[in-house]
Amino acid sequence: MQRATRVVIPAFSRYLTSLTDITPIWPGPLSTTCMHIQRGDLTYTAVVSTEVAPLEILELLESISTLLYEYTGQVATELTIKENFVCVYQLLSEMIDSGRVVTTDTSVLRGLVPVPSLMGRVIENVSGFSTNTLANSTASHDAPWRARNIRHTSNQFFVDIVDRIDAIIDTTGTCVSYDILGDITCKSRLSGMPHLVMTLNRARELDDVAFHPCVVRRTWDAERMIAFVPPDGPFKLASYHMATQALSRSMPLRVLGEARCTENGMTVCVTVEPGETGSRSVENIRIRVPLDSRAYNIGVQCKSGTHMVTTSRRPQVEWTLDEIRPSDSAIRLVIQYSTRNAVQSDSTNAAFVTFEVPGYSVSSIKVDALRLLRESYKLFKGVRYSTVAGSFQVRF
């Protein structure tokens, strides 16, 4: 730990600020490797000194970022980390023990570390003691993710199904790579020890499904139904991947790019038009176009949305559109810039796209039924669907 604090972390900080293209994995000094992700204004870094699967570490860092958001109710910043330092320290201690990942499950951690509150912080600052009065004995032996004797005045269960499109579009507008991944997240406010059974309409077309520990796996394998005792509060029930043969390759948004070399630089044109969304509008569209590292005199023309030119590290243009309706016509962004040296005509350019389509499921996954067993109260339930862009890249 001292070596990492005194040598590795300062060297890694210099690496982050010295280069334009930053990779998630960096071989550091003293036979270490630094793995990191950037979320908001914070960089989450893990220092590794032994052989380990990189995806495991990156997934751990992603889980820490998600957990801090759920505990603080906002994207973590330096200020929120300082204000909730005791809580963050306890969370990391419960998640990682002697360099090994113990658990990243939110429902389990909520039973070990209480969500911070104003009164809890006052008590900790005055007395020096943590307000964590919850004991492991409150959890059920059969369902360690759920405490005993939970009571709610209104019994509610909400489901969010989010499809994520990973795609690569080539210079002709042809989709050369297409995948749909998704998450089923839930928010449970149910009394007692409820048993739920969820039925999906296209369950047999899902593969590579990862479930929360509360799911009875043998029921899924035999009947393709999700049977579970839910944790209390928000949790991720499952993540999935759509089988390749079941994909229709529909695009909620069509994005085309074109680059032309000029005498002293380059002109980049990006065209956006609505795609297949089932009459839904595409919202929160952001298109990021990295430019040549030698670019200067950057000019941007667009009739819709807003744009921002960034010249720190590698120059880039970010184009933001609030909404595109199905009836809208194509919208165009034109970028012109100069370079100090000639630009190669065969160089590959790319635009990175993010968007969301509330109320639309590109995978057509639907909840057919949600049944409550072993409890007699009335269940209030709701389901929402949405589609977002994952790794969505347009090459030109």
Image (cartoon, rainbow, N blue to C red):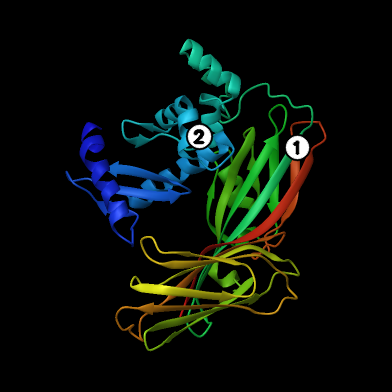
Q: Earlier in the sequence, mark 1 or mark 2?
A: 2
Kindly give the residue lying farthest to the front in the view shown: 297
Category of crowding for the residue at label 1, using alpha-carbon neighbours closer than 10 angstroms: few (below 14), some (14–19), many (at least 20): some
Q: CA distance from mark 1 to mark 2?
A: 30 Å
Amino acid type, callout 2: Thr
- Give the residue drawn at x 50%, y 34%: 80
The residue furthest right is 378
- In the drawing, what numbered circle is on residue 141? none
User: Residue at position x 42%, y 76% from top?
Assistant: 349
Q: Is residue 115 left or right of residue 197?
A: left
Q: Position of residue 346 (x, y in %)?
A: 35, 85
Vertical placement of residue 91 versus 14, above or below: above
Q: Quick check: 213 above or below 114?
A: below
- Residue 29, compared with residue 73, is above or below; it is below
Residue 251 in view = no
Q: Residue at x 54, y 14 (%)?
A: 123
Q: Residues within 10 Å of mark 2 (few under 14, many from 20)?
A: some
The location of residue 112, given as percent across then percent down, is 51, 25
Front position among marks 1 and 2: 2
* Quadrant location of the N terminus in the rendered image: top left
Residue wearing tag 1: 156
Locate residue 221 relative to residue 382 in the image: left or right. left
The image quadrant where one finds the C terminus is: bottom left
Drawn side of residue 360 relative to residue 259, left or right = right
Question: Which residue lies under the disc numbered 2?
Answer: 80
